[in-house]
C-alpha cells in the first residue's frame, strides 16, 4: 500500500486523476425528443411522478395556474431518481434536505412569477453516455436547457432566459430575479459565478443564467454537450467556453482545470502579464479570486464573495453572505455522517495542494 501511495505522490496525482480523457468528443446532437408534462407539488415539494421515462416537468403549486406558452424567465433543476430527490446532502459538516431545497425554489418561483421546470429521470441509451453513466447524467442540465431554450409558442413566443440551478442550491434573496443580472450586460448570454466555494475556478456550473440567443443554443450548449463523454460537466463547460472564445484547449484533468483555467483566461485576455492588470491584481494579490465582474465575449463572470452594486452575490457558499442562491453551507450543522446522497469526500480538497483556496 505504501508503495502505491509513493508512486502516486511521485506522479503528482490528484483526487481527480481518473477524470483524464479517454475518447474524442462525441458529436451527435443534444436529445430533442424529451417527453413533457405538468406536476403539482404540495408545500413541502412532494409530487407524484413515474420515473420510468426521462421527462421535462413543469412544476406548479397545487392550485397554480398553468401557462401553455413560453415567455419570461424560467428556472431549471434536474433529478435522476426518487432516492436522490429525497436524499440528504452533506457538505462542510452541514446537512441539507434536497426536497427542502426544491420546495424553496418552488416558493421563490411562485413569488417572483418564474416558471419552474424539473428534468426527471436518466438517459436510457448507452450511446448517450459512452464513458460513464454517473458523470454523463450531470449533462441532464444541458439537455434541459436546450429543450427550454428551443421551446416556442404558436406565435413564436420563447423564454427570455433559463436559469439552471443544482438541486442542492437554496434561494436566499427573494427580491432579485434573473432579469436584474441580465441587465448588467446586454451583450452577455451566459452569466455565472467564478471562484465559488472559495476556489479560484473559472465558472461554477451549479448556477447559470442563460439568455435565449442563437449563440447560447448553437455554440455554448452544443460545445458543452460534445464533451460529455470525457469529464465531469464543470470541466466540460470550461473547455466549451475556451472553444467559444476561439482558444480551444484541453486540460489534463479536473484538478488542472481548477488551477489553470481562470489564470489562463486572464493572462490571454487582459493583455500580457497579470501584473499589468488591476483586475488581475485583485484576483491574485488581494483575494486570490475574482473581485469584480469580468465580461469576456458573451460570457459574464461574477465574483462569488462580493455584492455587485445593489445586487447580492450571484451565489455564495453560506447563507450569511445573503447571496441570491446559497450553494454549499446551506443546511443545518452536523458532525455526523448522514444517510442519503453525500459529497463528504470532497471535503478532502482543502488538504489537496492542487486546489488553491482564495485568500481572505
Image (spheres, rainbow, N blue to C red):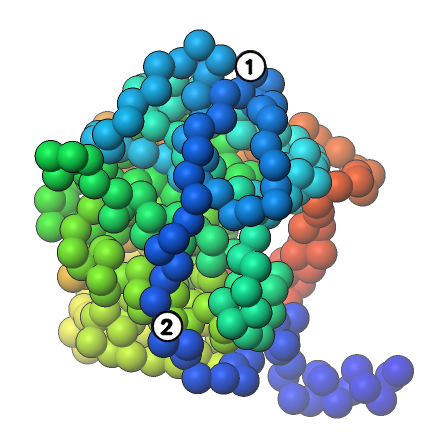
In the figure, is residue 268 to the left or right of 53?
A: left
* Residue in view at x 63 percent, y 83 percent: 12
Which residue is drawn at the image coordinates 57% and 59% (left, top)?
A: 124
Estimate the x, y position of residue 44 in percent, counting from the top left: 59, 18
CA gap between label 1 and label 2 equals 40 Å
Residue topped by disc 2: 28
Q: Nearer the viewer, mark 1 or mark 2?
A: 2
Residue 308, x across and y down, in percent: 26, 37
Camera-side residue: 40 or 83? 40
Counting residues from the start of the chain, the first of labels 1 and 2 encountered is 2
Where residue 43 is drawn, which disc sits there? Answer: 1
Residue 341 image position (x, y, % from top left): 70, 45
- Can you see residue 319? no
Judge whether 4 appears above or below 300 on screen.
below
Name the one closer to the observer, 126 or 298.
126
Left-right relation of 3 to 134: right
Question: Where does residue 220 sit, x and y in percent of width and height?
Answer: 27, 62
> Is the residue 104 above or below the residue 28 in the image?
above
Amino acid at each position: 500500500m505504501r508503495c502505491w501511495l509513493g508512486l502516486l505522490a511521485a506522479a503528482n496525482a490528484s483526487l481527480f486523476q481518473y477524470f483524464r480523457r479517454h475518447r474524442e468528443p462525441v458529436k451527435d446532437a443534444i436529445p430533442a425528443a424529451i417527453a413533457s408534462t405538468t406536476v403539482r407539488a404540495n408545500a413541502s415539494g412532494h409530487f407524484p411522478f413515474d420515473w420510468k421515462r426521462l421527462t421535462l416537468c413543469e412544476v406548479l403549486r397545487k392550485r397554480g395556474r398553468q401557462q401553455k406558452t413560453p415567455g419570461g424567465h424560467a428556472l431549471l433543476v434536474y433529478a435522476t431518481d426518487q432516492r436522490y430527490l429525497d436524499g440528504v446532502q452533506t457538505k462542510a459538516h452541514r446537512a441539507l434536505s434536497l426536497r427542502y431545497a426544491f420546495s424553496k425554489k418552488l416558493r421563490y418561483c411562485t413569488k417572483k412569477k418564474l416558471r419552474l421546470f424539473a428534468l426527471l429521470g436518466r438517459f436510457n441509451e448507452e450511446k448517450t453516455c459512452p464513458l460513464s453513466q454517473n458523470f454523463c447524467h450531470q449533462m441532464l442540465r444541458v439537455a434541459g436547457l436546450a429543450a427550454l431554450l428551443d421551446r416556442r409558442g404558436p406565435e413564436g413566443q420563447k423564454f427570455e432566459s433559463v436559469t439552471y440551478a443544482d438541486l442542492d442550491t437554496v434561494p436566499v434573496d427573494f427580491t432579485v430575479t434573473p432579469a436584474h443580472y441580465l441587465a448588467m450586460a446586454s451583450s452577455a448570454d451566459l452569466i455565472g459565478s467564478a471562484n465559488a466555494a472559495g476556489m479560484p475556478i473559472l465558472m461554477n456550473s451549479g448556477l447559470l443564467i442563460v439568455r435565449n440567443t442563437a449563440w447560447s443554443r448553437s455554440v455554448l450548449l452544443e460545445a458543452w454537450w460534445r464533451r460529455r463523454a470525457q469529464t465531469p460537466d464543470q470541466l466540460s463547460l470550461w473547455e466549451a467556453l475556451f472553444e467559444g472564445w476561439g482558444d480551444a484547449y484541453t486540460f489534463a484533468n479536473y484538478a488542472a482545470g481548477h488551477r489553470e483555467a481562470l489564470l489562463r483566461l486572464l493572462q490571454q485576455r487582459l493583455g500580457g502579464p497579470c501584473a499589468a492588470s488591476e483586475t488581475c491584481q485583485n484576483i491574485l494579490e488581494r483575494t486570490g479570486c475574482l473581485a469584480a465582474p469580468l465580461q469576456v465575449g458573451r460570457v459574464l463572470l461574477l465574483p462569488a464573495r462580493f455584492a455587485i452594486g445593489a445586487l447580492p452575490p450571484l451565489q455564495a457558499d453560506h447563507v450569511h453572505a445573503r447571496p441570491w442562491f446559497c450553494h454549499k453551507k446551506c443546511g443545518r450543522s452536523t458532525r455526523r455522517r448522514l444517510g442519503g446522497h453525500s459529497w463528504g469526500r470532497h471535503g478532502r480538497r482543502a488538504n489537496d495542494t492542487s486546489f488553491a483556496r482564495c485568500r481572505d
